[in-house]
């Protein structure tokens, strides 16, 4: 087993070639300038980074973070019970549950999101049903709102939350729960002091995956939100494509990646220390 | 047992995938033309005819917008012999030296192109490009909901259509529209003019249902939006599914656009690409192609082969008068940054 | 012995499943709708299924997508698991850096990943095609597998492995009979996420694909200009059908095999 650290080498080589080198290119580009045609000119400047601190872009970044946090929290709240249910079900249901949760997400993302357009629009399925039942007189404007964006985000990232939490819960030593109830702990207490701390690694992973995916996602805001708001990834995208300012786009990306990594790190640390405290407490 | 179950699934999936793989991937030694274009931009039959006539293969790959195309070609993404950039993109690509000059000796049918579409501002002398189709950005509206006479960009600002206005999701198109409304060039590089146009758009913002380029047709067909900025070709498409839609080119003038044939630098089959362009410009081939795809046909000699329905469609064939009011989007150089910033302000609702 | 779950949990899970499947149901229904428009119901038809099977572009894109997804998921699952396993044996100083590196693809915006890889490939004169798409997908998929497997390892003590080697098991035996069974749910979950990511990826694939390597997402994105066609709905329906059938078959054969064989085999 000691030798196994050398197994890291192929992965590291792979990542160095296809990840680090391209990233070095991007970082280098973030310090360059653009000419009038949008070509990158090799001339050192910090303009890209300075522009980011324009309140306009800072504000958009803030909006992005808020939406990502809200999405992550909702995703966690709806996914945890589901993952818990699956992890505690019979083996057969476990298999089926996992697969049934993932399969819909093998359908193209754009189509999935478009299905929500079909459901939510003024002449869509939901409005027609509500009108037929006589519950509403006028079709509701559900699409192209913030709520629709949130719904689309949560919908798309459910598996990213369920799977890691399931993995953590499945591994839990269930005898602990029996012991707890033998000792007279209530269900809630057992959950709070045994299940929850033991599933922390899963919660952590799920939250990171959902948070990062949401903040990098803009097709949902465009399709379900009517493109009436901007996410930081819209800006990055438009700098590389529409506005043809690759250096600014690179600078934004570097900032985005670094802040995301820092947030992940802080989050991991916070969760770890709480988990450790919980362990100490139970010991 | 449960774990075995999941492993089995993965294995089964892998086998299914691999067996599907073997279905594809047949290759041949024939000369192959690699076309990179918009989705469904050619009639499938016409492509087949070309393949058979010259005993060659055609591969088609798609991009969804000019910016994607540019980024890819610029970053060295190649292997394509023929691309179809829009007007302003042709001029950007020429300036960035991303295109091969065309050899007109191989394209004698170029004479068939309408004079008004030859020698365009974005490529003087047609050195690098030949028009494939063109159209105008105007106002499309639904007669069921919009009873007033629509003939001006100003009508979009009518409070009666609050929450039902659709705008293209494109900074140059939309700001260009507002510039036109105020009587300026759609490619103004005067920051004051641009700012005043954007301030105008900020007043329109509460009326906007959505910004959309790709799905705007569906939104009009489904009557989610009542009025909006729509390309003439798209309007012709919408009408087929919703006859209540009408299309006008506003009196203040509008933006004209085109998609073109061009050959990217370093293309391996340049001559074959030119042969293809020439073939497509044959009057009969051309009539067959545009009849099928429903875009405007730039081929002057092809009109006689078109159906009456096609010839009478005023959204496909715009009038002289309408075309006189139009202007190409010019390259605005570094002012593009100004457009982009204002656009970001407008859409994010921040200053 | 297992305690029964609270009934509310069951109801919640059922509601979640409905939530997940309602849009899918819409797609299935519209795939039989007798109109090119995705609007109202105009009667039942199989037309889109027949025209789908004749459409060489869609079929080619489907083949490409599945090829890329299967190969990249297998490779990334292997590499990502290796990385997570061997990370445990590194000292702290290395751990942080490598951990950060492995998280990188998850946080990098797609367009950056796509463009920078395109620049790299064109500098190295690698012709664009399926190979470059697969390489790119492996690169981001590794991370997802790594992150999930790593989480599993974090929650797992080393006592069992130590016990095994104390009892004289070779390191391979320990790995195969102790470690692997313990982490396999993590591996599977990681592989499922990687597969999903690969099937869905548009931006990265767009930039690193070349002639004849159009994947389904690229095709669909470019198609949207014309409105999402009912053939695409039909295709999605077929994909769901095929996935579910495969699972049923796998279940069936595994259950049949269970009778004869004693529990000896391992997950993968």
Image (cartoon, coloured by chain):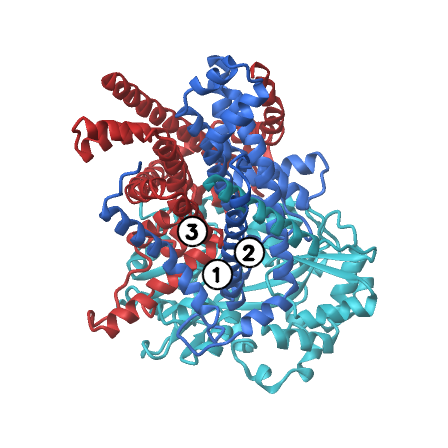
Residue carrying label 2: B64
Give the camera-side residue of C196 and C179. C179
Q: Quadrant of the C terminus of chain C?
A: top right
Callout 1: helix, strand or loop? Answer: loop
Camera-nearest residue between C125 and A89: A89
Name above or below for residue C197 compared with residue A170: below
Q: Earlier in the sequence, mark 1 or mark 2?
A: 2
Q: Do the residues at pointers 2 and 3 share their chain? A: no
Q: Are marks 1 and 2 on the same chain?
A: yes
- Circle 1 sits on which residue? B214
Which numbered disc, 3 or 1, marks the residue closer to the eye?
3
Residue B348: mark: none
Identify the element where label 2 is drawn: loop
Check the rendered structure and report the hue given to chain C: blue
In the rendered view, would you say A270 is above or below A113? above
CB within 8 Å, label 1 to label 2: yes
Give the residue pinned by disc 3.
A100
How packed is label 1: few (under 14 Cα within 10 Å), some, or many (20 or more)? many
Q: Is residue C201 visible?
A: no
Q: Chain of mark 3?
A: A
Image colour for chain A is red
Label 2 marks a residue whose chain is: B
- Residue B278, percent across and down? 76, 67
For marks 3 and 1, give the CA distance.
Answer: 31 Å
Colour of chain B in the image: cyan
Rendering coords of residue A94 (x, y %): 40, 44
Q: Residue at x 28, y 63 (%)?
A: A141
Helix, strand or loop at mark 3: helix
Asked whether, in this view, residue A281 is left or right of residue C212, the answer is: left
């Amino acid at each position: 087993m000691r030798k196994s650290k050398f197994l890291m080498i192929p992965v590291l080589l792979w990542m160095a070639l296809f990840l680090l080198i391209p990233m070095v290119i991007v970082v280098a580009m973030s310090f360059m300038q653009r000419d009038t045609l949008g070509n990158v000119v090799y001339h050192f400047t910090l303009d890209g980074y300075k522009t980011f601190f324009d309140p306009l872009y800072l504000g958009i970044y803030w909006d992005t973070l808020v939406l990502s946090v809200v999405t992550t929290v909702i995703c966690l709240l709806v996914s945890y019970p589901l993952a818990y249910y699956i992890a505690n079900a019979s083996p057969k249901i476990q298999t089926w549950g996992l697969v049934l949760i993932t399969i819909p997400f093998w359908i193209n993302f754009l189509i999935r999101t478009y299905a929500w357009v079909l459901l939510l629009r003024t002449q869509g399925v939901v409005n027609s049903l509500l009108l037929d039942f006589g519950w509403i007189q006028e079709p509701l404007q559900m699409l192209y709102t913030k709520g629709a964006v949130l719904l689309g985000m949560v919908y798309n990232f459910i598996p990213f939350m369920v799977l890691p939490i399931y993995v953590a819960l499945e591994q839990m030593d269930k005898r602990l729960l029996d012991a707890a109830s033998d000792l007279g702990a209530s269900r809630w207490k057992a959950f709070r002091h045994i299940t929850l701390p033991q599933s922390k690694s899963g919660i952590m992973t799920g939250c990171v995956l959902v948070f990062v995916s949401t903040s990098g996602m803009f097709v949902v805001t465009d399709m379900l939100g009517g493109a009436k708001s901007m996410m930081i990834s819209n800006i990055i995208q438009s700098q590389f494509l529409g506005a043809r300012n690759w250096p600014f786009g690179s600078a934004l990306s570097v900032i985005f990646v670094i802040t995301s990594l820092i947030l992940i790190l802080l989050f991991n640390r916070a969760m770890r220390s709480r988990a450790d405290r919980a362990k100490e407490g139970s010991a | 047992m449960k774990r075995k179950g999941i492993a089995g699934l993965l294995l089964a999936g892998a086998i299914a995938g691999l067996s599907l793989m073997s279905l594809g991937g047949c290759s041949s030694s024939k000369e192959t033309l690699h076309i990179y274009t918009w989705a469904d931009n050619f009639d499938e039959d016409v492509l087949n005819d070309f393949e058979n006539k010259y005993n060659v293969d055609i591969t088609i790959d798609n991009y969804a917008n000019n910016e994607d195309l540019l980024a890819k070609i610029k970053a060295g993404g190649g292997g394509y012999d023929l691309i179809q950039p829009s007007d302003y993109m042709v001029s950007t690509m020429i300036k960035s030296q991303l295109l091969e000059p065309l050899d007109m000796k191989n394209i004698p049918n170029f004479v068939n192109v309408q004079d008004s579409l030859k020698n365009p501002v974005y490529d003087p002398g047609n050195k690098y490009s030949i028009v494939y189709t063109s159209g105008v950005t105007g106002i499309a509206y639904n007669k069921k909901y919009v009873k007033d006479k629509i003939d001006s960009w100003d009508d979009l600002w009518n409070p009666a259509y609050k929450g039902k206005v659709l705008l293209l999701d494109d900074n140059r198109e939309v700001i260009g529209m507002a510039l036109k409304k105020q009587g300026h060039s759609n490619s103004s590089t005067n920051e004051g003019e641009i700012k005043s146009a954007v301030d105008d758009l900020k007043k329109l913002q509460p009326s906007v249902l959505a910004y959309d380029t790709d799905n705007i047709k569906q939104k009009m067909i489904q009557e989610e939006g009542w009025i909006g900025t729509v390309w003439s070709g798209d309007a012709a498409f919408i009408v087929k599914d919703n006859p209540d839609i009408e299309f006008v080119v506003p009196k203040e003038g509008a933006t004209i656009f085109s998609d073109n044939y061009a050959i990217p630098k370093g293309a391996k089959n340049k001559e074959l690409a030119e042969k293809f362009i020439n073939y497509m410009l044959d009057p009969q081939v051309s009539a067959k192609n545009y009849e099928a795809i429903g875009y405007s046909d730039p081929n002057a000699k092809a009109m006689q082969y078109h159906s009456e329905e096609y010839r009478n469609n005023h959204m496909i064939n715009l009038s002289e008068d309408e075309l006189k009011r139009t202007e190409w989007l010019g390259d605005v150089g570094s002012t593009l940054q100004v457009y982009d910033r204002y656009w970001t302000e407008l859409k994010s609702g921040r200053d | 012995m297992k305690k029964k779950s609270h009934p509310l949990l069951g109801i919640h899970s059922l509601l979640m499943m409905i939530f997940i499947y309602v849009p899918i149901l819409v797609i299935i229904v519209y795939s039989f709708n007798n109109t090119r428009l995705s609007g109202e119901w105009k009667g039942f038809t199989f037309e889109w299924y027949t025209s789908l099977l004749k459409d060489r572009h869609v079929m080619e894109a489907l083949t490409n997508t599945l090829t890329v997804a299967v190969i990249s998921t297998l490779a990334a699952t292997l590499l990502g698991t290796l990385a997570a396993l061997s990370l445990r044996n590194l000292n702290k100083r290395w751990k942080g850096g490598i951990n950060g590196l492995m998280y990188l693809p998850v946080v990098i915006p797609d367009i950056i990943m796509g463009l920078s890889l395109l620049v790299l490939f064109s500098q190295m004169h690698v012709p664009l095609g399926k190979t470059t798409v697969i390489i790119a997908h492996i690169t981001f998929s590794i991370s997802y597998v790594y992150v999930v497997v790593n989480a599993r390892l974090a929650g797992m003590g080393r006592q069992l492995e130590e016990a095994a080697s104390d009892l004289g098991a070779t390191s391979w035996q320990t790995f195969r009979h102790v470690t692997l069974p313990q982490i396999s749910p993590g591996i599977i979950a990681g592989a499922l996420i990687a597969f999903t990511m690969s099937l869905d990826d548009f931006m990265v694939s767009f930039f690193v694909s070349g002639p004849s390597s159009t994947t389904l997402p690229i095709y669909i994105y470019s198609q949207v200009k014309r409105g999402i066609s009912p053939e695409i709905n039909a295709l999605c329906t077929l994909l769901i059908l095929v996935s579910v059938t495969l699972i049923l078959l796998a279940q069936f054969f595994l259950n049949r095999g269970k009778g004869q064989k004693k529990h000896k085999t391992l997950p993968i």
